[in-house]
Image (tube, helix red, strand yellow):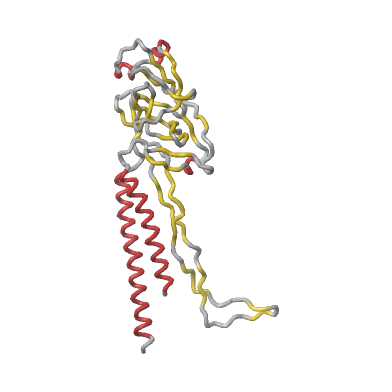
Amino acid sequence: MLRGIYTGASGMQAQIHQMDAISNNLANVDTTGYKKDTSVQKAFPQMLIRRMNDEVYKFPFGSVDTTPVVGKLGSGVELNEIYTQFDQGSLKETGNPFDIALDGKGFFTIDTPMGERYTRNGTFMIDDNGLLVTKEGLPVEGENGKIYLKLNNFVIDKQGRVYQNADFAEDPKRLVSMKENDWANLELVDTLKIVDFTRDRYLKKQGSSMWTATDESGAPKNVALGSSTKTIQGFLEKANVNPVTEMVAMISVNRAYEANQKVISTQDQMTDKLINQAVRV
């Protein structure tokens, strides 16, 4: 009897974890480069139920339980893991040359006081020292280190190469609309350091749309840009969260939680009758 209460409680606990993941996804639906979390549940091992009062068949060398099988009994579920889905988000045109989107797999590399961190959020700017930084003021790394630019007269091609020209007019629209053959007249500053991981699902979230590598994810490796992965200037990658899908999942979780709550209530009432009424009779 009490086993049903524990099973219902484990189901409620699993739904709480799933609701936390859904709520976090909905809260970050407008966060640039955000990747949705998914809660994975795992069932506890099922138990085989047999009738207790039937005889056990005797073998010459001992005994074996051959009582008739009633069926299997589930013993609840638990949270297995919450992992991140790195599906490509849709690209939104901003027209701002400081906005860079990644079309394909990979991450921008950011230099932080805690070491290298990785992000899909390409909302960049230039600080007072001419350094290309994130909106938090953290330097964006190139293949040769930090990237220094002169004002905003720069352009980035699909291979992540950063060009600038000190004599070029500060015209962001003109920079974005430049043709590839025009880049030969500009000064090559550096190439954005774009990396990827063998098992990106094991990256650890750090906040501010950043991740850090773990032993399970493996070490970062450089991505060859221009083919399967491209950098697109003047665009940002939106979160890969579908609000409608998440709202439907939230309703489903609420109903599952209420169902498990009803199971516990019913089991409690049955236990009350067994102890306070059946025993008395």
- Pinpoint residue 118: horizontal percent, then vertical percent: 44, 35
Q: Residue at x 40, y 34 (%)?
A: 120
Q: Residue at x 43, y 39 (%)?
A: 211
| Quarter of the figure with the C terminus | bottom left
Image side of residue 120 versus residue 93, left or right: right
Residue 36 picture quarter? top left
Residue 102 picture quarter? top left
Q: In this rendering, is residue 173 above or below 277?
A: above
- Pinpoint residue 268: horizontal percent, then vertical percent: 35, 74
Residue reaching furthest to the right: 61
| Quarter of the figure with the N terminus | bottom left
Q: Which residue is drawn at 52% across and 38% down?
A: 198
Image side of residue 32 versus residue 50, left or right: left
Residue reaching furthest to the bottom: 281
Image side of residue 218 versus residue 147, left or right: right
Residue 60 or residue 280, whichever sits in front: 280
Residue 89 or residue 208, whichever sits in front: 208
Image side of residue 144 versus residue 242, left or right: right
- Pinpoint residue 213: horizontal percent, then vertical percent: 49, 39
What is the number of callouts on the image?
A: 0
Q: In this rendering, is residue 74 above or below 238?
A: below
Q: Which residue is drawn at 34% across and 47% down?
A: 24
- Pinpoint residue 218: horizontal percent, then vertical percent: 53, 39
